[in-house]
Amino acid sequence: PQVLPLEALGFPPKEPFGETKATWRILEDPSRAVGIRDHQPEDSFRHIHWKATARRQDLQIKVYEPTTSQNLVIFVNVATFARHWEGTLPLLLEQVIAVAASIASQCVQERYLVGLMANGSIPHSDQPIKVLPSRRPDQLARVLEALAAVSSFTTSSIEKLVLSESPRLPWGSTLIVVTGVVTEELLSALVRLHDVGRRTVLVTLEDEPSIPYTLPPSTLVYHLPAKDLPFDQSLMGEPEEWAAEVAPPLHLARDRR
């Protein structure tokens, strides 16, 4: 895939996805409780250990395992219409892939542990497109190879993929969704992830927002209209291939059987 500096795509020049490694803060992983302590006034009631509180007759707070927010996972939406069965826009998908590749390239340079997932499978197989965050020296090559294998065949909605995979990712990971289309279902999924403490970023290539991007203030949103992106379109297939590949109506599909 084509790779360009993020600033050339419209991202801010510094820390587009939050803190750099030099300033990453220590977080607590709520899925890994390692002990209890006495309650302090600033503690959230969500972290109360009720059984220990009952035993000691005094409020007890769960102590969680510390972790750092150095993992970053890019979720690529291969669907280019709100309903994937409506067809696909090949050029838009190529641009989504190129934006994801550019994000991966810069973040690996900035020493993030970068991973990739897409709501599609490797062509001619049932293997999902999934590269978990890793310190491997060839990690960027693995991510770019996976992106090169992305096709327009959609195996699930992007919101289903993000919600099902996020519990398996290290706490403190930054989850970046790159998509050419935004739906209410995707926004609802990002709100749910925010509510459980996940750090999320939405990167949308819609030319014009199809719906208001109603998200918590702490969720980063980057609107990069596909028509304005500086990628070399001559490397993205022939112009006649850029028009929408629209799926036939169901009654026509049945007639072809």
Image (cartoon, rainbow, N blue to C red):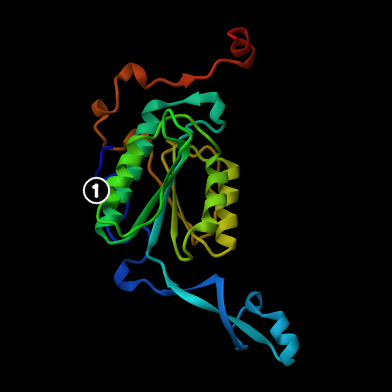
Give the x, y percent position of residue 59: 69, 88
Residue 240 sits above or below residue 10 on the image:
above
The quarter of the displayed image where residue 178 is located: top left
Residue at image location 28% in from the left, 50% down from the top: 140
Q: Is residue 6 visible?
A: no
215, 241: nearer the viewer: 241
Local SS, label 1: loop
- Which amino acid type is shown beneath numbered disc 1? Pro
The quarter of the displayed image where residue 16 is located: bottom left
Image quarter hosting the C terminus: top right
Residue at image location 38% in from the left, 43% down from the top: 224
Query: Which residue is labeled 1 in the image?
Result: 5
Residue 252 sits above or below residue 234 on the image:
above
142, 50: nearer the viewer: 142
24 left or right, relative to 254: left
Give the x, y percent position of residue 203: 42, 47
